[in-house]
Amino acid sequence: MIRVRVPLDLHAVAVGDTAFALATPLRVRSILALAVREAIGARAPSDKFERSLWRTLAGLENGDYTLTIDGRIVRDIDAVVVCESTVDLRFYLNRVVAG
């Protein structure tokens, strides 16, 4: 499991819409980018981040694993998920790993 802090929607705060300031809509692609950065660390080189993100997105599209965000199964990287302050991502392999 990877727990990711969701960035605050500053536009909603500036407009004064507190309901949208507390719940931020994000695309799955953006959430995965935050999760990859969390997993490899903030100081990791940008090329490693790009490769890791590309492989993560490709794996989801190819069906290599199942992704759940806060307990909901997500299959589309362009889907929008409404998030609060943190989200929990879980990755489940769709094949048996020998070992």
Image: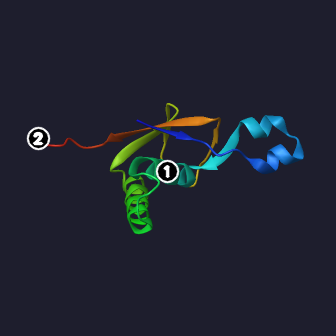
Q: Disc 2 marks which residue?
A: 99
Q: Amino acid at mark 1?
A: Leu
Q: Is residue 97 visible?
A: yes
> What's the residue at 49%, 50% (across, down)?
32
Assign a secondary structure to mark 1.
Answer: helix
Count neighbours of disc 1 (C-alpha within 10 A) and say few if under 14, some if 14 to 19, many if 20 or more.
Answer: some
Q: Kindly state the secondary structure of the residue where label 2 is placed.
A: loop
Rendering coords of residue 72 (x, y %) = 51, 34
Q: Is residue 77 visible?
A: no
Name the mark on residue 18.
none
Q: For the residues marked 1 and 2, what is the alpha-carbon distance in whole angstroms?
A: 28 Å
Q: Which corner quadrant holds the C terminus?
A: top left
Mark 2, other Cα within 10 Å: few <14 / some 14–19 / many ≥20: few
Residue for badge 1: 32
Residue at 61 percent across and 42 percent down: it is 6
The residue lying toward the viewer, choosing from 71 and 3, is: 3
Residue at far left of view: 99
Establish if 13 lies above or below 46.
Answer: above
